[in-house]
Amino acid sequence: MTVPLTLKSHRFRAEREADWRRLDALLARMERGGAGRMSDDEVTAIPVLYRSALSSLSVARAISLDQSLIAYLESLCTRGYFCVYGTRTTLAGRIAAFFAGAWPAAVRELWRETLVSAAFMIVGTIVAFILTRESPDWFYSFVPMDLAGGRGPAASTQELRDTLFGSHGGDGLAFFSTFLFTHNAQISLLAFALGFACCLPTAFLMTYNGLMLGAFLSLFAQRGLGFEFGGWVLIHGVTELFAITLAGAAGFRIGWTLAFPGERSRLDALAEAGRKAAIVMAGVVVMLGCAGLLEGVARQLITDTFVRYGIAAASAFVWLSYFYLPRRDSP
């Protein structure tokens, strides 16, 4: 004689429902953040009850019990899985993990692309320096008029010196910092976002950024202000140029992976490269924020050239140590 399906389901539920309800109640307490108030017996009971619920779900599917019971058990087992095996970290914990390991590890993995990105910028700097030294007319070929801000070949030596050591109002500092942060963030984001086009736009942006730097350096060097200009730009430039270089490296990783995915499928390779590049870019935003403060505030308030070089050297030491010193937990 065949037992009706409803009777099977009723008996099955009656024999096991007490354990399901207990697991449901314990999971609800965990989900409300009450884990710290649970006893040791309650904590150790969760994995046991979870495995029992999994067994019940397997049996329910095998004997084709009613769908409402199966749906309930699936939901209960899903919650139990995340409670037993899922990672439960706070926002502060995730931020700490990002700065402690994820960001520097991603930067180290992109060391080849970082060298390539830096090479394009250095080549651009050298080319612009030489051309502007030979003919000042080259200056505005590399530097837009609005970005020059009066620091051009037509300016007198005293006017150029004033731009390095002149005083600025407090409101001007905040505006200048915001403007430069926005400008540099745009360059960084473009260098990253356009990397998919076979790396060419990224290479152009890295080179163009170097051209602007080389043109300014050449102009000030011709007026005997090269050393002073170096301190003026490096107090923030170490952080800023490093950030832009890393953004270029992220763009190069995306473009290179798209062109040469290797043995994996192009989609899988891009997904992996995109995750690493996204971590680097999240850190780039942090670096640009630091550079914006140094550029808009510290550089204007600190007028001693040697102190500026000291801050530049300290920032270089901090970033290089943070990213590249070996760690025991390095992957």
Image (spheres, rainbow, N blue to C red):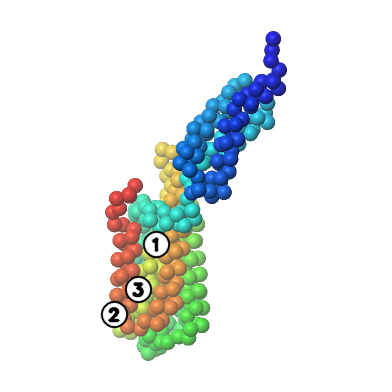
Give residue 178's position: percent from left, percent from top: 50, 74
- Is 95 or 12 nearer to us in this picture? 12
* Residue ID for mark 3: 234
- Is 265 or 304 nearer to us in this picture? 304
> What amino acid is at disc 2?
Phe
| x 54%, y 50%: residue | 33
**Distance between the alpha carbons at the discs numbered 1 and 2:** 25 Å
Q: In this orientation, does residue 222 appear?
A: no
Rendered image quadrant of residue 155: bottom left
Q: Earlier in the sequence, mark 3 or mark 1?
A: 3
- Is 8 or 150 nearer to us in this picture? 8
Mark drawn on residue 306: 2
Give residue 116's position: percent from left, percent from top: 35, 57
* Residue found farthest to the top: 1
Check the picture and name the quadrant holding the N terminus: top right
Mark drawn on residue 4: none
* Residue ID for mark 1: 245
> What amino acid is at disc 3?
Leu
**Distance between the alpha carbons at the discs numbered 3 and 1:** 15 Å
Q: In this orientation, does residue 118 appear?
A: yes
Q: Earlier in the sequence, mark 2 or mark 3?
A: 3
- Is 312 or 157 nearer to us in this picture? 312
> What amino acid is at disc 1?
Thr
Packing grade of label 3 (10 A; few <14, some 14-19, many >=20) is: many
Packing grade of label 2 (10 A; few <14, some 14-19, many >=20) is: some
